[in-house]
């Protein structure tokens, strides 16, 4: 019985590889692409990076700090047009998760929009007044 199965494919084992007359032979590069791995977990790596990304918590300002900021905003309002350089640090909430980041913007204030509660810088940066945590500048130094 053993010999019966040993020679099962002897009639075709040495035949030439068949080639199609209708279709051209596929290149090695195209054949390799068929067997390349696919991304079964599309977006998984991006989700992990987003989870690991750190955000800052927004600081709760005391009444004294808020009063000081209001005083500085009033001084800025009085000196708009004199090209006084200021540095405003404000909080930008993160769109995807809790927290955000503190950003410092340097430049001259173009206007303070009391209706929208924003500070507009000369470089068109718009800063919500509620998010401001600190204002520095030469005009505030004593």
Image: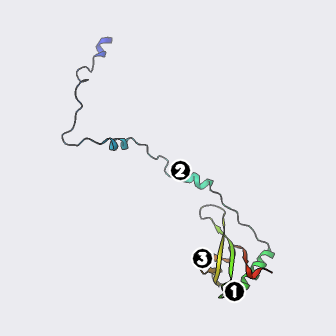
**Quadrant showing the C terminus:** bottom right
Left or right: 11, with 5 as reference point: left
Q: What secondary structure is marked by label 2?
A: helix
Q: Residues within 10 Å of mark 1 (few under 14, many from 20)?
A: some
User: Label 1, on which residue?
Assistant: 77
**Quadrant showing the N terminus:** top left
User: Label 3, on which residue?
Assistant: 125
Query: In front: 16, or 44?
Result: 16
Q: What secondary structure is marked by label 1?
A: helix
Q: What secondary structure is marked by label 3?
A: loop
Left or right: 47, with 33 as reference point: right
CA gap, disc 3 and disc 2 = 34 Å
Query: In front: 5, or 141?
Result: 141
Q: For the point 64% across and 68% down, which residue is it?
A: 92
Looking at the picture, how far across and down is residue 38, in whole percent?
A: 44, 45
The numbered disc on residue 109 is: none
In front: label 2 or label 1: 1
Quarter-wise, where is residue 77 in the image?
bottom right
Q: Residues within 10 Å of mark 2 (few under 14, many from 20)?
A: few
Left or right: 9, with 137 as reference point: left
């Amino acid at each position: 019985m053993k010999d019966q199965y040993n020679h099962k494919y002897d009639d075709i084992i040495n035949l030439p590889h068949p080639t199609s007359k209708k279709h051209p032979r596929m290149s090695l590069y195209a054949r390799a692409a068929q067997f390349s791995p696919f991304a079964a977990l599309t977006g998984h790596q991006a989700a992990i990076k987003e989870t690991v990304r750190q955000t800052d918590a927004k600081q709760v300002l005391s009444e004294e700090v808020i009063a000081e900021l209001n005083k500085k905003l009033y001084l800025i309002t009085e000196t708009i047009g004199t090209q006084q350089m200021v540095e405003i640090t404000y909080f930008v909430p993160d769109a995807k998760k809790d927290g955000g980041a503190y950003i410092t913007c340097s430049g001259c204030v173009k206007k303070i929009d009391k209706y929208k509660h924003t500070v507009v810088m000369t470089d068109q940066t718009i800063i919500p007044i509620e998010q401001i945590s600190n204002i520095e500048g030469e005009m505030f130094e004593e």
